[in-house]
């Protein structure tokens, strides 16, 4: 397994960072695999995969670059510059474009775990990679960026609240279950590869959420390291919760959707991101549900988290799963 040596000061100074470039690269990985993790991703792939495949069919060199760069066990480093706080997509992709061509070829040889094909022995690989990322951003990510950003922000709220409840170890264990884990003795496991440990004490450490499933690590030695991880739970698939028709008829579809989502604690910000409802509407629904004794709230740091009460659990379970054309969707 690969792990980093992290001292207390580095962990205490770590933070969460949103990155349009990381979100775009995660979208590129999803297009490359064409494997949806939930119905929301399936719908997104149905909408964008044909155009992506047409673009690669018209540019065989870039198509070969993608296949080489997204290796089975390793991603070519120049494709994933370490995210920086406040960086725009244009700023991030400019770093991909500015990569040294020789270094890019060397990174591809590592991700291929073998010699570089002759078709990729050229100096314009960083420019081609940047152009493809710009295409994915423009066509498939940017039009939906406001919603994605709300989901990413909501995930950060959930993680920071988790720090106050269970400490950093609980958060690190949950970022990429099976890949990231706090090992104790100042050791953070970051993947399952048999790589030499890295001493990163004193460096900048950031955690970067993305909405597609997956993740990776990146670094700029010796100063900056990042763990990119997928949003979890209800945030991963905002449209994935079915509201029982009977519950929607009783409470109203929008209010019932809020109650169904609260099987785990969520903040108002998270509920807005997941449901797509306005802040005022979510607030009104929560007040009604609180007054009815169906949800409860508690403070976690600077956030207020809502969850179902025992009465709310009984009501949702009694309604059962939704069926047929009367089913309401959150």
Image (cartoon, helix red, strand yellow):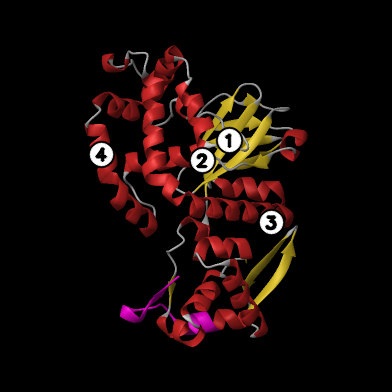
Q: Which residue is mark 4?
A: 53
Which circle marks residue 20 in the picture? Answer: 2
Pick whichever of labels 3 and 4 is earlier in the sequence.
4
Report the magenta residues as a range.
315-330
Locate the C terminus and report the quarter of the image it occupies. bottom left
**In the displayed structure, does residue 123 sit left or right of residue 58?**
right
**Where does the image place residue 59, in percent across and percent down from the top left?**
25, 28
- Disc 2 and disc 4 in contact, CB within 8 angstroms: no
**Where does the image place residue 87, in percent across and percent down from the top left?**
58, 35
Q: Which residue is mark 1?
A: 87
Q: Secondary structure at mark 1?
A: loop
Pick whichever of labels 2 and 3 is earlier in the sequence.
2
Q: Is residue 304 in view from this perspective?
A: yes
Within 10 angstroms of label 3, few (less than 14), some, or many (20 or more) residues?
A: many
Q: CA distance from mark 2 to mark 4?
A: 22 Å
**Where does the image place residue 245, in percent across and percent down from the top left?**
41, 82
Query: Residue at (51%, 28%) from the top-left corner?
Result: 194
Pick whichever of labels 2 and 4 is earlier in the sequence.
2
Within 10 angstroms of label 4, few (less than 14), some, or many (20 or more) residues?
A: some
* Residue found at the far bottom of this picture: 250
Q: Nearer the viewer, mark 3 or mark 4?
A: 4
Q: Secondary structure at mark 4?
A: helix
Which circle marks residue 161 in the picture? Answer: 3
């Amino acid at each position: 397994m690969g792990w980093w040596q992290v001292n207390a000061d580095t962990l205490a100074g770590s933070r969460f960072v949103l990155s349009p470039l990381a979100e775009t690269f995660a979208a590129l990985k999803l297009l490359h695999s064409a494997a949806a993790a939930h119905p929301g991703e399936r719908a997104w792939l149905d909408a964008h995969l044909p155009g992506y495949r047409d673009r690669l069919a018209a540019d065989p060199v870039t198509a070969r670059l993608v296949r080489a760069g997204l290796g089975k066990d390793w991603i070519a480093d120049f494709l994933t510059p370490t995210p920086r706080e406040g960086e725009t997509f244009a700023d991030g992709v400019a770093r991909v474009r500015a990569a040294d061509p020789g270094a890019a070829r060397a990174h591809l040889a590592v991700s291929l775990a073998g010699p570089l094909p002759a078709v990729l022995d050229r100096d314009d690989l960083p420019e081609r990679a940047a152009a493809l990322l710009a295409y994915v951003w423009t066509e498939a990510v940017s039009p939906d960026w406001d919603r994605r950003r709300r989901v990413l922000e909501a995930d950060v709220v959930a993680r920071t609240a988790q720090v106050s409840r269970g400490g950093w170890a609980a958060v690190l264990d949950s970022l990429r279950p099976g890949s990231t884990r706090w090992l104790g003795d100042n050791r953070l496991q970051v993947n399952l590869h048999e790589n030499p440990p890295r001493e990163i004490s004193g460096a900048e450490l950031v955690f970067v959420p993305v909405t597609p499933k997956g993740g990776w690590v990146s670094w700029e030695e010796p100063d900056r390291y990042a763990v990119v991880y997928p949003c979890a739970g209800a945030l991963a698939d905002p449209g994935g919760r079915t509201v029982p028709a009977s519950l929607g008829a009783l409470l109203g579809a929008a209010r019932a959707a809020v109650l169904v989502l609260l099987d785990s604690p969520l903040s108002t910000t998270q509920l807005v991101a997941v449901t797509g409802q306005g802040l005022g509407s979510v607030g009104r629904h929560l007040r009604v549900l609180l007054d009815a004794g169906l949800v409860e709230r508690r403070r976690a740091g600077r956030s207020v988290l809502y969850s179902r009460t025992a009465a709310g659990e009984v009501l949702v379970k009694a309604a059962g799963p939704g069926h047929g054309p009367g089913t309401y969707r959150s």
